[in-house]
Amino acid sequence: MKKNAFGWAVRIFVIVVLAGTAIAQSQAPMPDHFSGILNDYTAATGVGGPWEMHGTWSLKLKRESGKADFSVVMTMEHPDYWVLANPPVPTTPPVPTLSPTVDSPGLRNPHTHHLTMTDALVSYDTMSVCPVDSPPTTVRFVLTGAADITGNGTAAPFQTTPAGVTTLSPLQVCITGGTEVTYSNMTMTFTTGAPAIKHFGSLPIHGVVRLPHRSDDHDHDGDRR
């Protein structure tokens, strides 16, 4: 009887420990800092494109306020497709060593953008209308707010009128994930009426979540330098 009682006690103890671990994991605090990279193209028409986009992004959740800050630094330039569709005009007189279709870096119109969205509203409504990924992902949370955008360090022309009036661009940012990686995908989409649509288009711009972490997590400080 003592052996049986001891065996049952061990089993009960193991079950309690496992249950406690599962509860602790399920109640683990959600990260409040996210960062990653983005790589995408704009549409081929309608925005002077296509444009090739590469950059990094970061996101900070402000839990007490239900808001968040989001920022992006990125480069844009015309890809090979655009260069082939828009060959340069041959020089006059022609330069023997240059081909009429020479790929000059300047033809790609490289430039930079800094995008900031401060105090964006945060929603955890998983039914929010976010772009559909393939394979599909699950919405984790959504930011909506107004983005301020520069072009080569100055207010972007598309958001500033000749009179100097600045109009920010409504932006939606979706953080989604799958069964193996909880936070894996980022999409940013300029919504109807956003001045930035003139340059970026209305299609989602895709990125990947590289580093979710809590504010007290210093293990990856070196990665953010």
Image (cartoon, rainbow, N blue to C red):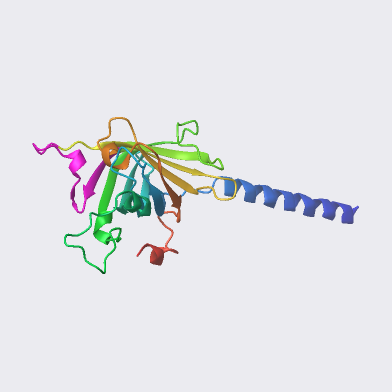
Outermost residue on the right side: it is 1
Q: Position of residue 187 (x, y in %)?
A: 42, 43
Corner quadrant of residue 217: bottom left
Q: Is residue 153 or residue 109 the one in the foreground? A: 109
Q: Is residue 201 or residue 26 the one in the foreground? A: 201
Q: Position of residue 96 (x, y in %)?
A: 24, 68
Q: Is residue 193 or residue 51 the one in the foreground? A: 51
Residue sitting at 28 percent across and 46 percent down? 116
Q: Position of residue 146 (x, y in %)?
A: 28, 37
Q: Is residue 201 or residue 223 the one in the foreground? A: 201
**Vertical arrangement, residue 98 with respect to residue 3, above or below:** below
In magenta, the rendered stretch is 146-165
In this rendering, does residue 66 appear at all? no
**Vertical arrangement, residue 48 with respect to residue 7, above or below:** above
Corner quadrant of residue 101: bottom left
Outermost residue on the bottom side: it is 97
Task: Report the quarter where the C terminus lies.
Answer: bottom left
Count of marks overlaid on the render: 0
In this rendering, does residue 175 appear at all? yes
* Residue 172 within the segment the image draws in magenta: no
Residue sitting at 70 percent across and 49 percent down? 16
Q: Position of residue 111 (x, y in %)?
A: 25, 54
